[in-house]
Image (spheres, rainbow, N blue to C red):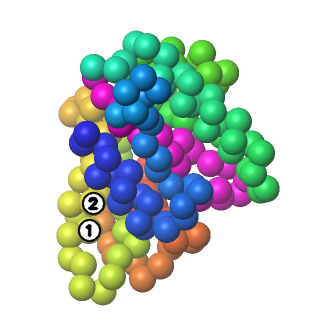
Amino acid sequence: MPDTRDGVGLYLRHGDRAFGFHFVVGRENERVIGEIGFVAPPRRGVVTIGYAIVPSERRQGYATEAISALTEWSLEQPGVENVRAQTLPDNEASIRALLRAGFEEDEPGTKVRRFVKVLGMVNSAADFYDHPKVINGCSELFAEVWGKENGIGVRSAVGMGSLPDNIPVEIEAMFELA
């Protein structure tokens, strides 16, 4: 599963077993069918979840069940007041799974006309030099969401010895609003 490497990386980066990524295992055959977990440990009372189900097991309610269980567990933890999730606007299956699990869509706010600039700060060791490659993911996501004409702007990437709560990446972005 392509996302597993990302999940393992997040777990290793913030090193929190409870607020890491976990495998979703099918009840019938006890095979790994997906993953679900947290982007980072709780911060200011908020956690953000992420998940993926292998294509052959989608549309069977596994994502909704996993999202519901993780959300319920999260809200029982000290210091967690809010659980967030995000998905691409055209990922209708993911949106349906989140809605069935009790999430609500944010009201559409001001529309982004174009992306202007991003500064990516990468929590890294002194001998790590691929900061731009890490921030490429952000640039690619913005291009996918707003199109190449509006989603690609000026970009800077720097390495940091530490970031708040030992988060792996912090993004500062500027947008032109419609």
Q: Residue at x 24, y 78 (%)?
A: 128
For this rendering, which residue is in front, 114 or 93?
A: 93
* Image disc number at residue 131: 1
- CA gap between label 2 and label 1 equals 5 Å
Q: Which residue is mark 2?
A: 134
For this rendering, which residue is in front, 8 or 158?
A: 8
Q: Give percent across and percent down for residue 156.
A: 29, 64
Identify the amino acid type marked 2.
Val
The span picked out in magenta is 32-55
Crowd tier of the residue under label 1, counting other residues whose Cα lies within 10 Å: few below 14, some 14–19, many 20 or above: some
| Label 2–label 1 contact, CB within 8 A | yes
Q: Judging from the image, what secondary structure is the residue with disc 2 in?
A: helix
* Residue at the extreme front of the image, as rendered: 29
Identify the amino acid type marked 1.
His
* Residue at the extreme bottom of the image, as rendered: 126
Q: Give percent across and percent down for residue 34.
A: 38, 35
Q: Residue at x 42, y 82 (%)?
A: 161
Q: From where the camera sits, is residue 89 visible?
A: no
Q: Is residue 145 magenta?
A: no
Q: Give percent across and percent down for residue 116.
A: 35, 46
Q: Residue at x 67, y 49 (%)?
A: 46
Q: In the figure, is residue 43 to the left or right of 129?
A: right
Q: Main secondary structure of the magenta part?
A: strand
Look at the picture and state if 88 lies above or below 96. below
Q: Is residue 35 magenta?
A: yes
